[in-house]
Image: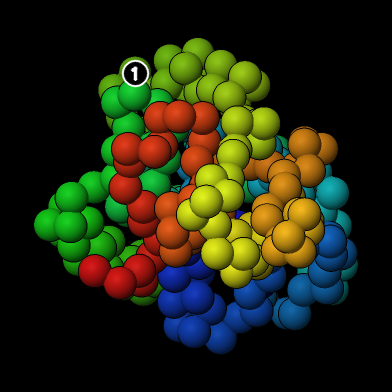
Amino acid sequence: MIFCFSGTGNTRWAAQHLAEATGERLALMSGEDTRYTLAEDERIGFCFPVHGWQPPRLVRNFIRRLTFSSEKPLTSHYCYALVTCGDSIGLTMEMLDGELAKKGLRTHSSFSLVMPESYVCLPFMYTDTPQREKEKIEQATQDLNTYTRLITERRKNEHHTKRGFMPWVLSHVIGAYFNSRMISDRKFTVDTANCIHCGLCAKVCPTRDIRMTGNDDGASTPEWLHDGRCTCCLSCYHHCPRHAINYGSITRRRGQYYFGHPQ
């Protein structure tokens, strides 16, 4: 069983690769199901993007609701985590293990993949250049093949992660502020002059935080629900074919990225 959350597609690409290699099921963490029956010797994998050097709130909440039934003790199932990030992950894996411990689980091995940058809501944050994007994906492909072999072989105590400089500060100071104060959908806006009313933003939103509402001329435009479900993955922003969606004013001058986008 592979539990996956993905916004712009980096993590979904990795999780699908693992599912194909192991022959195991892929379940979305953004779904409503949280009860699962494990097959004998089925692996338990968690795949998600790092948000502010921490596991996203959505991932934590999913794990807290997660329940398993298994003929064997839960600890007998091989458990691993693979996360994606733009650079480093801080203490994300330690925080994840803290959540899993409440379920009687722990990761036997952990992995991180450096993928193209997608968070562009701060003054110093930009999408990667096409060349850097290409380099990251090429290296990530090599790393993923290595990690897939280790996971398939159920190798334990394999920890291939990039924690970064001062990981405690990254996760518990900067990341804590980011995840408590900067995860909100209230700064999303739509440029109605550029919007083509395609509804793609609502379709790709992994948390279903967008609804299309009609305006005076009968066309539908996106509206964010402001109910706390948004995780600021920016999938809506990056997939908009007309760059009509922005987060505040800063993203009007930023690029767009999603895995597999046309070059």
Where does the C terminus fall, quadrant-wise? bottom left
Would you identify the image quadrant in which residue 98 lies? top right
Residue located at (76% from left, 54% from top): 215
Where does the N terminus fall, quadrant-wise? bottom right
Residue 254, image x and y in percent?
33, 41
Q: Residue under circle 1?
A: 166
Residue 227, image x and y in percent?
82, 37
Front residue of 96/104: it is: 96
The image shows a total of numbered marks equal to 1
**Going by the picture, which residue comes out furthest to the left?**
131
Would you identify the image quadrant in which residue 29 lies? bottom right
Q: Is residue 44 visible?
A: no
Residue 145, image x and y in percent?
31, 72
Instruction: Assess disc 1: are there few (<14), some (14-19) or many (≥20) residues with their C-alpha within 10 Å of its C-alpha.
Output: few
Q: Could you tell whether 220 is left or right of 24 in the image?
A: right
Asked if residue 106 is positioned above or below residue 20 in the image, the reply reads: above
